Amino acid sequence: MNDKFESMIALIDELTQTLAKLSDMQREIVKAVRADDIARLAECMKHEQAISLKMRNIDQKRIKLQEQLGFKEIKLSQLPSKVKDPDMQIKVRKAADRLTAQYKIVKSTSEVARLTLESNLRNVEQMMKKMGVDPSQTHQSSISGVHTDFHA
């Protein structure tokens, strides 16, 4: 049973590291937007999308492992209380705490990135209006075909 918990800790740690990469990428997105560097922004968004896919894959593995442990419907915060071995319980709790802390950081950096993008879009719309162009009449195109789900 401890082997499965060790695997769970490894997955939680991998998810924590991936969230840290996502947070770093969101910071890079903010820098690119502030620098008006569209090419860099497009590249960052590609990387962000790849990180998000990796994160989903890791989380699917975690869910499957949790089911194997018989903990299908419990939250991450409840997982340590399900571990019988006291030493393993501490390890699981620490891994869960690290993940929770990193998740809070990602939420924060995601919000900054979203607000920065929205602010710049408003600025572009205002400039278009000053030039006599109705922003609602322009057709939308994506940067190099990139589509990013910021809620991932």
Image (cartoon, rainbow, N blue to C red):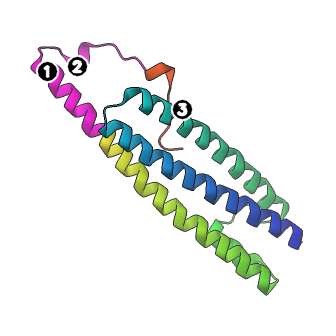
Magenta stretch contains residue 126: yes
Q: What x and y, as percent, mark residue 105?
A: 47, 60
Q: Residue at x 15, y 27 (%)?
A: 126
Residue 46 — which label?
A: 3
Residue type pointed to by label 2: Pro
Numbered disc 3: secondary structure:
helix
Q: What x and y, as percent, mark residue 78?
A: 66, 73
Q: Residues within 10 Å of mark 3 (few under 14, many from 20)?
A: some
Whole-number angstrom distance, CA of label 2 to CA of label 1 = 7 Å
Q: Is residue 30 above or below residue 69?
A: above
Residue type pointed to by label 1: Lys
Numbered disc 1: secondary structure:
helix
Q: Is residue 148 visible in this depiction of the protein?
A: no
Magenta stretch contains residue 132: yes
State which quadrant residue 77 falls in.
bottom right
Q: Is residue 106 visible in this depiction of the protein?
A: yes
Residue pointed to by mark 2? 135
Q: Which residues are magenta?
A: 118-142
Q: 110 left or right of 123?
A: right
Quadrant the N terminus occupies: bottom right
Quadrant the C terminus occupies: top right
Q: Is residue 57 above or below residue 43?
A: below
State which quadrant residue 132 falls in.
top left
Decide: marks 2, 1 in contact (CB < 8 A)?
yes
